[in-house]
Image (cartoon, helix red, strand yellow):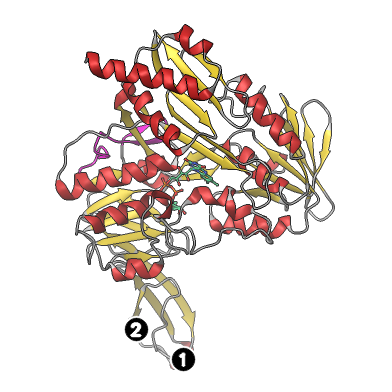
Amino acid sequence: MATFQKSVFLGGGIAPRTSVLGSFPVWNVATYVPKCFRVKTLVTIAAQKNTNTEYVIVGGGNSAGYAAKAFVENGAAEGKVCIVAKENVAPYERPALTKAYLFPVDKSPARLPGFHTSVGGGGERQTPDWYKEKGIEVLYGTEVTGLDIDKQSLTTSSGDTISYNKLIIATGCTAARLPEKIGGSLKGVYYIRDVADADQLVSALKSAKKVVVIGGGYIGMEVSAAVSAWNLDVTIVFPEKHVMPRLFTPTIAAQYEELYKNNNVKFRKEVSVAKLKEGSAGEVVGVELTDGSTLDADLVVVGVGAKPVVAPFLEAGLKSESGAIEVDGSFKTSSPGVYAIGDVAAFPLKIYNRRTRVEHVDHARKSATHCVNALVKNSTEEYDYLPFFYSRVFEAPGSERKIWWQFYGDNVGEAVEIGNFDPKYAAFWIESGSLKGVFLESGSPEEFGLLPSLAREQPPVDISALRSATTVEDALKIAQAALEKQKVTM
Ligand SMILES: Cc1cc2nc3c(=O)[nH]c(=O)nc-3n(C[C@H](O)[C@H](O)[C@H](O)COP(=O)(O)OP(=O)(O)OC[C@H]3O[C@@H](n4cnc5c(N)ncnc54)[C@H](O)[C@@H]3O)c2cc1C
């Protein structure tokens, strides 16, 4: 696709200028005029940016990194794969940004290249050189703004063209922002989605005194835990009754909140932000709450959710589902040759017979591998994902109590909770007599290893036996025995 850009200027020479946007310049001097009045018209034809055109991945985040790994493993990478990445760094394990990346500077914080994909999944560290060695082209700092399905091409914010034979959309999410009119863009207000955001936050933490974290979900919990290690005054604010309301029971939440309080994190629950207060230099100086109170703050971190980055692709006509890109069990979109993976994909969750979108790294990794297998091996196997969430906090060196929980399955039905959080705790969700979901804090590797099969196989469980278990170990044995019994009777 050629686009034309006219640039008119007065001057004497006719040497073509190279466009800073990377387009090919073409001089078009139609009629002779005296040299001192000569007008030149610069017509630029959009440049073809990529050399590798067989498989183009738009994104450059978690799922793009794992897709690259899968192309390499399938022997289909060299000279064929191009990653178009808005960020200026090679794909990395994004969860690190609210964990080890935020450790105080004297406590060995994680930094790139330490956590490039696919180290989180136990694979090779895919540095920029790794992509070069494997013959994968990466266009860094390149934002895709348009898709032309008929022409099988993408346009970038610089007006360049990227051609593809098969396209994988892996653009992830962007952090939801507080509205500007209530101070969402004031100096000192931070959102955290990528390494550049995290760098700005770390730099601000060095001189901060009073930090307010808005949001009691993943980001709020992880950021406030990390910031507590900086010995700053930290308050977390959210409108719900307790932290992680979509997953935690009130009892699970109460134990984590207690631990946070022991780490000097303060809570303001069941209250929302009315406005961020602005100082004389346009900086945030406080957080006004809907109950009329104000928290002093010189640094605010907002963690109030995320939105899939899908606008250019939905505008091109891809079928959408609840604001995401609808895909089938092979991550094919409604348009032949176009796929979507990771956070942006609304896929069939086979195990529960419903369509969903998952904003978690485990799905980013697995969807990438599944999609590449479908593309390269023509595999028709349907994606069969088991929901898995985890978090790890208070892991900075010197921390007295580290937190590490995992959850598999669906938190439906009655929750049976066992343990004293010293350090272990478990919850089992039982619906219609069968185990549907399981949560475990501070398990051993073997105990964590049991959780996926419990959640996937959903064995019938004697709920009264489970309720009478006195330790997490006993409860897990009861669940395991139910699993074994189911295997024998099947
Ligand atoms: C701070 C943080 C902590 C997290 N912690 C956890 C955790 O503990 N556990 C967990 O399971 N999950 C966690 N997640 C979620 C997990 O990281 C995501 O689900 C995962 O990264 C999704 O992978 P993805 O490839 O779909 O998107 P991303 O990894 O977000 O990658 C998308 C990439 O696309 C780029 N992009 C966007 N638009 C364009 C465009 N138009 N053109 C070119 N490039 C574009 C972005 O810049 C980004 O690099 C966390 C997320 C964040 C932000």
Q: How far apart are marks 1 and 2 (CA)?
A: 15 Å
Rendered position, 411 above or below 106:
above
Image quarter hosting the N terminus: bottom left
Q: Name the residue under label 1.
A: 12
Q: Give the range drawn in magenta.
A: 319-336
Residue 334 among magenta residues: yes
Say which mark, if any, is on residue 97: none
Camera-nearest residue between 440 and 198: 440
Residue 413 appears in the figure: yes
Q: Name the residue under label 2.
A: 31
Residue drawn at point x = 64 percent, y = 58 percent: 200
In the image: residue 236, left or right of residue 362: right
Residue 310 among magenta residues: no
Residue drawn at point x = 30 percent, y = 29 percent: 348
Rendered position, 292 above or below 47:
above
Q: Where is residue 213 in the image (x, y as percent from the top left)?
A: 70, 40
The three-letter amino acid code for the residue at tag 1 is Gly
Residue drawn at point x = 79 percent, y = 49 percent: 298
Mark 1 or 2: in front is 1
